[in-house]
Image: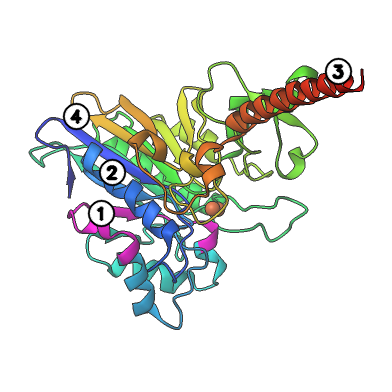
Amino acid sequence: MLKFNSNGRFGILLFGDLHEYFDYADSAKFKDMQKLMNAALDMYRPDLCVLLGDTFNTANCKDDPEGFKRGVKDICAPILSRNIPVCAIMGNHEHDAGCDAEVIKAYGEIENMTMRCDGVPGKADYRELIYSHDGKKPLACLWFLDSNNLCDDPNISVYDWVHEDQIEWFEKESAALKELNGGNPMPSYIFQHIPVPEEYKLLRKAKLPELPWSVEGFGKRKGTHYVKARGTVGYLGEGPAAPDYNSGQFDAWKRAGGVKAAFFGHDHLNDFSGFVDGIFLAQHKTAGFRAYTDGCHSCVRYVELSERNPLRFRQELRHFKEFGLKSESLGPIFKKITDRESMAFHAAGYGISALVSAGALAYFIKKLRK
Ligand SMILES: [Fe+2]
Ligand SMILES: [Fe+2]
């Protein structure tokens, strides 16, 4: 049972897109990821950790489910050794190996870890209630949803989405929780891997002078460049890989009433967030060093709910470099140049230095000729 702690708080620490392989043991990248995990766990002392999907690059556990479980336990050792519960969700890479049932079963069998199918058979959709500190009353609901893999028809969308029958389950459960909560919508927080298309409402089309620091849209939005819209905070490092098809999931959240925030993985460079129609949407970047990253900006996100008012929450991001950690896996340049902004800054610095040096050289050559 998840409960608000004695301070009336419930802290959730998010780890997105670790993309570990099964050769993790001696890797400097694996060690960097665990350094970040340990530092974040020491700082925030969360009540729950969430793995936002794509935890493994290919989660093949059909042939060796015990090996898969050992891998998950090794990756999550800093969390599990502290006896902190973990809720895991399916990313497209967990689906990639084509053995969903085995993957879901394996995650669910690890002590202190949860993944299960509460709704549509075969889909890893489930919910957890957070109870008052005395365990008497459910005060909030955390939803862990399965956003599937690639779309069957690439002409419709590259990536898949949370399907209509899954949304029906969410709506049915939300209605039951409303009844349980005396007719008021249950304060709800969503965790899923692939974002909803409404995430693009946090962006706007770039104007011509903004193109150098804009990002190109993904899928059918290719060819259109975006920058953050007013009110959106955080880093936009790539076109969000949301589906092109809208299954109506976001509208279902609005109808349900209690949804306050949704946290997504999938994009490795984006950590922007903001409000769309009163719901906080947060894109969470990778906490790992395996897949494409922006180096020292790998990060965790901490979300804290308050027992006094579970409709309110606070959240913050913290990057690897902000913990004061030293990387073993990043080269000397990438330790400094870690995102597009610092890359542009460094490029401008080197460009100016090159121009000054060339000017000086030309001046001296001219002098020598005289
Ligand atoms: Fe990923
Ligand atoms: Fe993904």
Please, what is the three-letter code of the amino acid marked with disc 1? Answer: Ile
Of labels 3 and 1, earlier in sequence is 1
Please, what is the three-letter code of the amino acid marked with disc 2? Answer: Ala
Write the residue at 46% across / 79% down. 62
Q: Which residues are magenta?
A: 74-93
Please, what is the three-letter code of the amino acid marked with disc 4? Answer: Glu
Q: Which mark is residue 79?
A: 1
The residue pinned by badge 2 equals 39
Secondary structure type for disc 3 = helix
Rendered location of residue 87, percent (x, y):
32, 53
Q: Work out whether residue 33 or residue 109 is closer to the camera in this orientation and state it.
A: 33
Report how far apart the C-alphas of labels 3 and 4 lie in the structure: 76 Å
Write the residue at 43% across / 50% down. 52
Q: Work out whether residue 80 or residue 102 is closer to the camera in this orientation and state it.
A: 80
Of labels 2 and 1, earlier in sequence is 2
Report how far apart the C-alphas of labels 1 and 4 lie in the structure: 24 Å
Residue furthest toward the bottom?
Answer: 63
Would residue 180 be seen by someone viewing this image from the given angle?
no
**Looking at the image, is mark 3 or mark 1 nearer the viewer?**
3
Circles 3 and 1: CB atoms closer than 8 Å: no
Q: Work out whether residue 3 or residue 43 is closer to the camera in this orientation and state it.
A: 43
Which quadrant of the structure image shows residue 8? top left
The residue pinned by badge 3 equals 367
**Looking at the image, is mark 3 or mark 4 nearer the viewer?**
3
Whether 67 is drawn above or below 37: the answer is below
Write the residue at 53% across / 61% down. 93
Circles 3 and 2: CB atoms closer than 8 Å: no
Of labels 1 and 4, earlier in sequence is 1
Rendered location of residue 179, percent (x, y):
28, 37
Q: Tell me: 340 left or right of 123.
A: right
Report how far apart the C-alphas of labels 2 and 4 lie in the structure: 26 Å
Residue furthest toward the right?
Answer: 370
